[in-house]
Image (tube, rainbow, N blue to C red):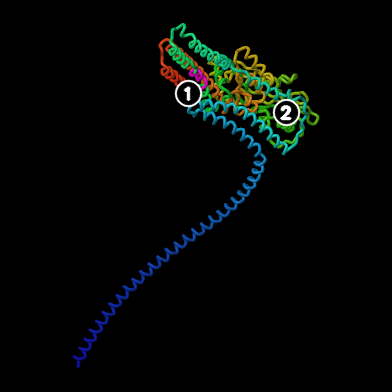
Amino acid sequence: MNKKFTSLLLLSSVILITTADKIRAKADTTDSSIEQQENIINEAQSAKDKSLSDISLLQSKIDSIRVEKNKTEQKISEIKKQAQNLNNKIEELSKNIEKRTDVLESQARSAQVNSNATSYVDTIVNSKSLSDIIQRLSAMATISSANKSMLNLQIKEQKDLNNKTGTFTMRVSKDSKDTVFSKILTMVEESQNNLSPTADFIKRFEPYYVNGVLVIFLVLLIFSPMFLGWTLTETISRSLVFLVSASPCALAVAAIPATLAGISSLAKQGILFKGGNFLSNLINLKAVAFDKTGTLTEGKPKVVDFYFNPELDGESFRNTLVAMEKQSNHPLANAIVNKFETQKVDYDIKVKNELGTGLSATYQGENYRIAKPSAFKMVSQEWIEKQENFENEGKTVVFIAANDKVEGLIAIQDTPQKTAISAIQYLNKNQIKTIMLTGDAVLTGKAIGKQLGVRDVQANVMPDEKAKIINENKEKYGPTAMVGDGVNDAPALAVADIGIAMGDGTDVAIETADIVLMKNDLGNFVSAHKTSKRLKKIVTQNIIFALLVVIFLVYISLWKNASVVLSITLHEGSTLVVLLNSLRLLLPNKKV
């Protein structure tokens, strides 16, 4: 009994132990599963935290994008406002452009004429034969008349435009033939009819030479058998060889192709000649007179100093000054207006233009005058001292008077042309007298002349005195040129041996002048003078060479019994040599 019980206990213990082991094994397995689940939970929690961080970052980016969107919308709104303002300005500009269309079209037509002239000269340069050059040369004569017609058309169109936009009162005080413009045109026509000495000599020499050759040819035909003992066949053969040998083909092309080549080369540089004789005669100049404003200077003066009586109403005085000067187109008037016009001045003032002196007007019972110092008789010492100080510095002084009493002074200065000094140095070096014509006072003129290197300064010159001064210099020095740009320079340009106009000058000056410097560069005048030197040298070479060949051919035709073939070969060969030598003028001048 005890043994059975003991066995049962043992069996039960074994079973309990086994069961405990299984339970312990399951517990271990459960613990491992719980650890795995905890790891999974931890990983899930980490993924959740990362997702929340990403969501937060994304939200901040969305907020930033919203801010940028708002800023962009604001900028778009501002741009729309600016675009609207621009549209309004464009409409205003369009209205102004419509008002100026007629003027611009007329200016474009005028520019087209000059463009045609330059392109035509280039066409001559590219000609392949002498006949092409001669044919095109005849058409160049139409350029000047085309410019004149275009000028008349432009004046008419400008008058039509003025009649559409306003009214004016005109009083005729002189007959048309007594006007300044009519006199200028008369001077131009007279000067155009005067041939240069070289052209006149060629014109007179040419028929004598041809007639002489024909006479000798007839003499040989008639008297050679009697006096030289030639047979009839020999007489005819040698006479024909002589006629071929003595024909002036090389002489005929000694000057014209060289002149055309020089004119063409200069046209490419913006230097236009209205005739070959002006280029030929340029080297003969003994004196050159320059207008100051717009020629030796830039033509854009500025007010650099001023002084008004402090006891006056400064604002009213300035407004009156501006109202008067706005009715003048003189460069000095524009400088004064640009300096003192701070507000729109609408004074009803009738101004009298005193040519070469200044302006005068009456306003609110007061007599005002703006003029050069020499126009005033009674001036206090204070103003004279200020005037002399400014003039010694090369400044142009203008007095302003109220009721004949000087109450103000303005000092104006213009900038010299960059190439003016070098051009004047070149002329002085070549023993050509340089003269400056100016309406400024003596001290101002001398100061500017010294700065530029001009040898002779003619100050206080009135517009109608320039032509007289040119004639005096022609008698004193010889061939004289005039360089100018204004309407007042036209009479002097006409009476000068050679008139030279600046390209930015008035139409009347350009029409009157013989040479036009299209780029307003006095350095081009130097280039033209150097080309004239080369032209004379080459033409001289051509003439000497042609004459030597003619003499040689005549000799061998009469005494060496040369054949017609040899005579023609040498004759035409010499003509080609002369042409090739002339074409060297197409090359630009060497820079020193």
Give the alpha-carbon distance from disc 1 to disc 2, as whole Å: 69 Å
Q: Observer-nearest residue: 536 or 401?
A: 536
Amino acid carrying mark 2 in the image: Pro
Residue bearing mark 1:
583
Where residue 185 appears, x then y in whole percent?
67, 24
Asked if one can make out residue 586 in the rendered structure from this viewpoint, the answer is yes
Q: Observer-nearest residue: 287 or 185?
A: 185
User: Is 497 situated above or below 85?
Assistant: above
Where residue 162 appears, x then y in whole percent?
71, 36
Which corner quadrant holds the N terminus? bottom left
The circle on residue 310 is 2
Left or right side of 312 for 252: left
Between label 1 and label 2, give the one nearer the viewer.
Answer: 1
Residue at far front of view: 232
Residue at far bottom of view: 1
Left or right side of 197 for 314: right
Range covered by the magenta-colored residues: 249-257
> How many marks are shown on the rendered structure?
2
Residue at far top of view: 227
